[in-house]
Image (cartoon, rainbow, N blue to C red):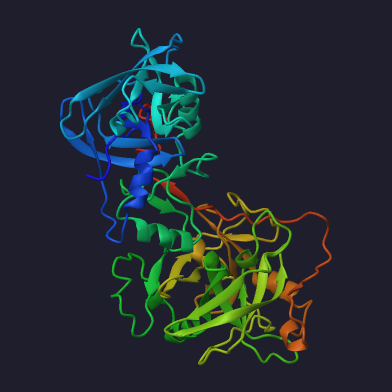
Amino acid sequence: MLFACSGIPLPDGTTREHLTRFVTSAALVRVFDEKRNRDDKLRVAVRLPNNRITDGFLGLYDHDIAIVTCFGLIEVRPISFKACPDGIQALVAGRAFESGNLMAMDGFVRCNNTWVPDSQDISKAVLGGPLLGKDKGFIGMNFSICHDDDGTLTYAFLPTKLLRKRLEHFGILNPKHLHFRGYSLPKGVSSIIPSGFMKTIYRLKSYGYPMPPPLVLELNGELLNHFEERFGELLAWKGYPYGDPAKSCRNRVWYQLPKEVVTNISRRVVSLASFNGFVRFFACTGLIIKWHGSKATRTVILTSASLVNRCNDDKIDSNLTIEVFLPPNQRCCGTLEFYNLNYNIAIVSLKKNFNAVRLEDIFSKTVQEPSEKVVAIGRDTRLGPLMATIGNVKRGKKGCKLDCKDLKLSTCKIKKAGIGGPLINFDGSFVGMNFYDGSEATPFLPRHKIVEVLSRVNDLPSESGCNNPMPIDIGEGTKKNRWPVPEPYWYHGSLDVDRSYVPKCIGRRLQ
């Protein structure tokens, strides 16, 4: 045992998952962090009033208090936050962990939310325990041991009113909402990294994902709207060492395409990622194209400008670096050459050309309309297998969440990794570039509009001695198209749902 203190049970929450929560001193967190090592196997045990020991999970904390949670409903009497008359005399309670005995200390309350025990013997067991008045009403919670200038032992406590406000700020009492969309830690509040999840947290941070709310990792919650989500049928590259990724796919897409089309796609569709330092900013798909410039010595990729732009900004982030991956082993840094934020188009060139690529000539005068069936293509951001899904081009834009009037919709269902990927006919001809708005349909910018925008520029800036990317001016009005991308968020299904919530069941209407 490294440290022991007391805790005070809190009122039940309203989540579907039954939890018993205790508030205690943040001293427990400080010891937890100090003693943590590579094994990452520290755990918190809670001894209950009936002497039963159960697992506890550290979660939110600040400089003074910390929250420990046990799963299930435990027979404890939660604290009452009713106001207690002020008084000088005080009784402090705590529970010894090893023996389970309840201990008490007499003392008197001073100003500045401190109290002095009658005995000057230090007892850390009372940290996190209650401070009671002469009528045994709850005055506050002890959270720290300190000494006066003259050496007098004192304890700092958080009064009932302040403790209640602190717990409301934590979202423990009277939370405004339970869902995790857009969740962020309250100001001044931190969350402990659970034991055994240190590497997971490091990986999430490097991917630029939001940190999980308390208990979500321990209870196998999932991150939604992330760049690693796959779609459709997967096609592994030659020598793929991770098994057949298409085994579980019901709709066989790749065998319906001519072999030459599949070969062409595999040599011209790449994955891209942008980084701010060592943290990933965005990931998407791109298409290697034949550039129409007079020099055109570099390999050129057509992709989405979301790679270098946040949806609410009218400018790109010039501090980002770009990495391009063409399986099995071709990786290279990319250079942003041209961009148009109004149509979400970006042109990236490679500093070192890839081998054995097959360029897509989108500027060819032979333009075909979308066939009855179309295929949306993407490339997995991590391991690189191709992804494909079949659909139809829809009439109208009903259900599209993006405001660009030139967009069309297909019934192909993709994920975020498919942004910037090509939509093709069954003969392999390029139809347009895909986007993702989280709806059931997939918006795409038609080929003719892409060509119209790109035809306004010629030689790549990097080939003309310019080190900065150039915006493509199309001379349109003041209205700016917005291209929001669904943000990643955590989901559990019990921690983020009220237990009284009953989903709407829409049945058939009686005639």
| Residue 323 against residue 101 in the figure, above or below | below
Which of the two residues, 432 or 163, is positioned nearer the viewer here?
Answer: 163
When asked about the image quadrant of residue 442, the answer is bottom right
**Quick check: 302 above or below 73?**
below
Percent of width and height locating residue 348: 64, 78
Task: Name the residue at the front extreme.
Answer: 150
Left-right relation of 403 to 510: right
> Quadrant location of the N terminus?
top left
Total marks in image: 0
- Give x and y (percent) for residue 98: 17, 35
> Considering depth in this image, is 226 or 125 the residue closer to the camera?
125
Q: Give how far across and how far down residue 420 sits, in percent.
A: 58, 69
Judge from the rendering whether residue 403 lies leftward or rightward of residue 476; answer left or right.
left
Quadrant of the image occupied by residue 298: bottom right
Q: Say if residue 504 shows up in the picture.
A: no
Quadrant in the rendering for residue 155: top left
Quadrant occupied by the C terminus: top left
- In the rendered image, residue 128, in percent from the top left (x then y), is placed at 35, 30
Identify the residue at image location x=29%, y=31%: 123
The answer to whether residue 359 is above or below residue 66 is below
Residue nearest the viewer, comparing 162 with 348: 162
Between 453 and 52, the one nearer to me in the picture: 52
Residue 271 visible to an observer of this rendering: yes
Residue drawn at x 38%, y 45% as measured from the top left? 30
Drawn side of residue 445 relative to residue 63, left or right: right
Residue in the image at 68% along x and 55% along y = 482
